[in-house]
Image (cartoon, helix red, strand yellow):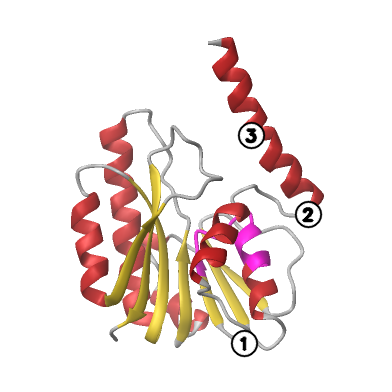
Amino acid sequence: MKRSASKKNRWSNHYSQRAKKEKFPARSVYKLDEIQQKFGLIKKGDKVLDLGCSPGSWLLYAADMTKHGGLVVGIDLKPVTIELPPQVKTYTDDILSIDENVLAAAGSDFNVVLSDMAPATTGQKSVDAARSFELCRAALAIARKLLLPGGSFVCKIFQGEDFKEFLTSVQTSFKKCKIFKPQSSRKVSKEIFIVGMGFRG
């Protein structure tokens, strides 16, 4: 048990220390970095929507990828308090019952929609997976509304009995669909990412 805990701590400390050194507020940025390195979804000048954007690591990373000609928009229940580049704007709202005025202000014609959202966990895998599925469905609905044809979608989901249903939903909306587990995700975590490419519009 001690050996296992020590290994877990080394994993956590490695990514946490790296994030601190590279001035990101959370180690989750390395999941997006692995996705970007593998699929190359975000390009210079792109418009990117980040759902569940707090504390802001994915916003910073996406802004770095899009450069000054791009635009990155984030929405989260919690306000983002870190300093952000000028091409980034954020809104505070609940994705599950989002205000249409917030969506209108966020804009449309996005090249990429990202979701690293996770529910407040209960420790009961079936309950947590069901809550994750609801967040994913909300994220996909927003992506379908705001993505440009040909655009991309990245969504984290907890694996459970609804996983195949959600995967099928993504497959119907995108020409290509991949399942990806970043190395920076905890090995024991049920989280996995679905990447949709080539939005059918």
Q: Is residue 151 left or right of residue 55?
A: left
Instruction: Confirm whether the magenta stretch covers residue 59.
Output: yes
Instruction: Confirm whether the magenta stretch covers residue 58.
Output: yes
Q: Secondary structure at mark 3?
A: helix
Q: For mark 1, does the 10 Å Cα neighbourhood hold few (<14), some (14 to 19), or many (20 or more) residues?
A: some
Q: Residue at x 70, y 81 (%)?
A: 67
What is the C-alpha distance between the residues marked 3 and 2? 15 Å
Image position, residue 79 (x, y; %): 61, 58
Q: Which label was assigned to residue 12?
A: 3
Image position, residue 82 (x, y; %): 73, 59
Q: For mark 3, does the 10 Å Cα neighbourhood hold few (<14), some (14 to 19), or many (20 or more) residues?
A: some
**In the rendered image of this protein, does residue 22 appear above or below residue 129?**
below
Q: Earlier in the sequence, mark 3 or mark 2?
A: 3
Q: Confirm whether residue 73 shows in the render.
A: yes
What is the C-alpha distance between the residues marked 3 and 1? 33 Å
**In the rendered image of this protein, does residue 121 appear above or below residue 37?**
above
The stretch in magenta equals 50-61
Q: Residue at x 22, y 66 (%)?
A: 169
Image position, residue 106 (x, y; %): 51, 79
Q: Which label was assigned to residue 149?
A: none
Q: Secondary structure at mark 1?
A: loop
Outermost residue to the front: 38
Q: Which amino acid, by three-letter code, is at mark 3?
A: Ser
**In the rendered image of this protein, does residue 146 appear above or below residue 79?**
below
